[in-house]
Amino acid sequence: MILLTILFCIIVLVLLVSWAKVNPFIAFLIVSIMAGLLLGIPLDKVMQSVQNGLGDTMGKITIIICVGAMIGKLVAVSGAAQKIAEVLVNAFGIKHIQWALVIVGFIIGIPLFFETGFVLMVPLIFTVVYKYKLKAVYIGLPMLAALSVTHGFLPPHPSPSALVVIFKANIGTTLVYGLILAIPAIIIAGPLFARSLKNIDSQPLDTFRAEEMPDDKLPGAATSFLTALLPVILLMAGTLYLNTAHSTGMLHNLVAFVSDAPMAMIISLLVATYTLGLKQGLRMAKLADIYGHAVKDVSLILLIVAGSGAFKAVLTDSGANHQIAGFLQSFNLQPLVMGWLIAAIIRISLGSATVAGLTAAGIVSSMVLHDHSINPNLMVLAIGAGSLAFSHLNDGGFWLFKEYFNLSIKDTIRSWSLMETIISVTGLIGVLVLNQVV
């Protein structure tokens, strides 16, 4: 009966978001309260459970998501992203310009949220396409594949960061594993898959031509690269040191403090404020305005993450999560495959990668936390990969790609939807391979 109740609640969540078009945060609240009541939590305890779930989740990832958005916004408006793109395109030449754009998409995708990266990078793609008379989908899709992979696989993006918290994984280790998986996923779903799309005729609108900043206004190449990548550098360096040096002295504590994800993000923001802000002539008032808009851009993401935390708390407080874990284990599926499959099914139903990942995590979290044979870092990546499966008409990214590239529904499914699915399947295969060696 408990399993049927949970299935009913998940179906209601799917219908509220995809059919009734209810805001995902509101949908999560409605379903969380309904689930609590149906699962037997007393009336006077239901809202307490929901509120505890909201606060627990928000308290752990608000710094990562908000500060990450601020850094990403500054990288965009300062011209650092444009500088990175110019350096790489010049280095690779016209013949290999597709690979240059893939690298740009990957580098920019690490600090930027997907939608911001998309809007920033697509005009760059169209500039190259118009200038050299190239096929827009063939040139542009690999770069967007890189953006998508970073969004689904790598902290400090919202879903991977939240999954790290839920599964009590190590954010640095997850990032290292994610980078290992990202490379083959981007190559296969990007440049290799794009070879089959050369005959797609896309006529992007002139409106989307990039408006470049003058060269004398751009930050230096070294400044642009180092500032954009500083969060990753701090997280990876800290992970490598802490996993190889086992001292407990002051240096060890200092490295642990600096490489802790929220602290790494704060340090990176302070550095970016100087290198890409004050040093470029921006006043603090202007920077404050940029940061304020960045937080507004991710406010809904924060609420969705918090709503998923409420749903997870209700499942945990009612004891239903143990029933779910037991039911899923009866199928004898490999746990990482199970996590991927649940996320993929919810993604296809709901459209949102973030909602799919967080909902799947709420369902399998109990199993991961109680079965120490399951690598939590790999479960983060398995669910992240599943959450990217087959983006279609109920996903905002689908429509961004369709409208910017001026494509038909058929060609958008043939290119964008299949690209996302290839990333998802490649990610799962990579997770299963890593699981054999780590």
Image: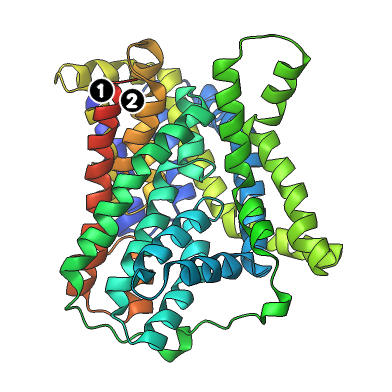
Q: Position of residue 317 (x, y in %)?
A: 45, 19
Between 14 and 253, the one nearer to me in the picture: 253
Disc 2 from disc 1: Cα separation: 9 Å
Above or below, 64 against 136 in this view is above
Q: Position of residue 233 (x, y in %)?
A: 60, 40
Above or below, 394 against 139 in this view is above
- Where disc 2 sits, the SS reads helix
Pointer 1: residues within 10 angstroms few (<14), some, or many (20+)? Answer: many
Say whether marks 2 and 1 touch (CB < 8 Å). yes
From where the camera sits, is residue 380 visible?
A: yes
Numbered mark located on residue 335 in the image: 1
Residue at 48 percent of width and 67 percent of height: 91
From where the camera sits, is residue 58 visible?
A: no
In this view, the mark in front (2 or 1):
1
Q: Position of residue 384 (x, y in %)?
A: 36, 40
Residue at 47 percent of width and 70 percent of height: 89
Pointer 2: residues within 10 angstroms few (<14), some, or many (20+)? Answer: many
- Chain-order first, disc 2 or disc 1: 1
| Number of marks in picture | 2
Instruction: Give the quadrant of the C terminus.
Output: top left
Residue at 47 percent of width and 88 percent of height: 207
Between 20 and 72, the one nearer to me in the picture: 72
Above or below, 331 against 31 in this view is above
Left or right of 67 in this view: 348: left
Q: Which residue lies under the disc numbered 2?
A: 364
Q: Amino acid at mark 1?
A: Pro
Between 308 and 365, the one nearer to me in the picture: 365
Residue at 40 percent of width and 23 percent of height: 376
Instruction: Give the quadrant of the N terminus.
Output: top left
Above or below, 252 against 13 in this view is above
Q: Give the colouring mode of the picture.
A: rainbow
Q: Amino acid at mark 2?
A: Val
